[in-house]
Image: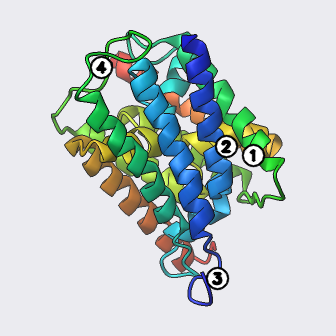
Amino acid sequence: MGTLFPDATPLMGFLGGVMIGIAGAIMLLGLGRIAGVSGMAATVLGIGEQGSDRKLALTFIIGLPLGAALMSLTGPMRIAFPDSISLLVIGGLLVGFGTRLGSGCTSGHGVCGVSRLSPRSLVATGLFMAAGFATVAIMRLAGML
Amino acid sequence: MRALISLVGGLLFGAGLALSGMADPSRVTGFLDLFGVWDPTLAFVMAGAILPMAIAWQVQRRVPRALSGDAFCVPQTRKFDARLVVGALLFGVGWGLTGICPGPAIANLGLAPLAVLPFLLAMAGGMVLHKLWARQR
C-alpha cells in the first residue's frame, strides 16, 4: 500500500479473509457449528465441550494444513517465526490456556462472534486485541523487536 | 457427507489463512506493532471474513436447521465473567509474544511444520492444563 504502509497486502488480505468467512459460513449453515479453531482443537485432543463432534472437528483441523499447503503451491510465501524457542513455548501455553478459559480465539470470537454481534465475543475480541497491542508495544520498548 | 463438508470448511479456512498472509507470524506482529512499521493487512482480513459470516448469520436466523439436518449448535451464554476477561487477556499476550493464534498454528503444519512445532505442543499443553485446572474447581 505504497510508502505509508510498505508491508501491507490489503487485496490478498481481503480475499483470504473472504475465504475464511465462507469457510465459517459453510460450517454454520452446512453443519450448524461455529468454526472456532481453539474449540475444535480441544475436541480433537479429547478435552472439548460436551456434545462436540470429534469426527467433524478432526476433518476440519486436518483441512487447515492441507488447504494452506495447497495455497502455497500458487507462489512463494514468506513465513517468519520468532527465533526464540522459549518465547514460542511461553506464547503457546498462554494461547492454549487462554483460549480455553475465554471460550474462543480469533476465529470463534473474532470472526464468528463479532459478525453475529455477540456481546461476549465483542468484549473478548477487544480484550485480546488490546492485550496483543500492549504486549508488542512492551516488547518494542524492551528492545525485543 | 458431514465429514466432507467439514473438510471443505477446513481446506478453505487454511487456504484463506495462507493467501491472506496471516499464516506468517511476522505479519501478525506487524499489525500489532503500532509503534513500528505498521502493517494494516490483518484489518482487511477481518473485514473480508466478517462479511460472508454476517450474511450467514442472517440466513441462520431464517432457517430451522443446517443443511446436514443438524440443529444449530451455537453459544447461548450471555453472561460476562472473569473467565472470559482473563482468558481473552492471556490469549492476547501469547498472541502478541509470538504472532500466532490457533488457526495459523495448525495451518502451519502444512507450511513450516518444524518451526511451528514448539508453539503447537505448548498450545496443546496449555489446553490440557486448563482442563486439569477446570476439573479441580
Is the residue at mark 4 from the same chain as the one at mark 1?
A: no
Which callout, 3 or 1, points at the residue further toward the start of the chain?
3
Q: Amino acid at mark 2?
A: Ala
* Distance CA(mark 4)–CA(mark 2): 39 Å
Q: Residue furthest left?
A: B79
Q: Foreground: A92 or B62?
A: B62
* Image location of residue A52, percent across then percent down: 43, 14
Please rate how many residues cluster around mark 1, counting C-alpha atoms within 10 Å: few if below 14, some from 14 to 19, many from 20. many
* Distance CA(mark 1)–CA(mark 2): 5 Å
Q: Foreground: A4 or A99?
A: A4
Q: What residue is drawn where x is 68% and y is 25%?
A: A62
Please rate how many residues cluster around mark 4, counting C-alpha atoms within 10 Å: few if below 14, some from 14 to 19, many from 20. few
Q: Disc 1 vs disc 2: Cβ atoms closer than 8 Å?
A: yes
Q: Is any atom of residue A94 visible in this view?
A: no
* Residue under numbered circle 3: A6
- Could you say which disc has been placed on residue B15 in the image? 2
* Residue under numbered circle 1: A71
* Distance CA(mark 2)–CA(mark 3): 24 Å
Instruction: Give the color scheme: rainbow, by chain, secondary structure or one colour.
Output: rainbow
* Residue under numbered circle 4: B137
Q: For the residues carrying marks 2 and 3, which lies nearer the camera in this image? A: 2
* Distance CA(mark 3)–CA(mark 1): 23 Å
Quadrant location of the C terminus of chain B?
A: top left
Q: Secondary structure beneath disc 3?
A: loop
Which callout, 4 or 2, points at the residue further toward the start of the chain?
2
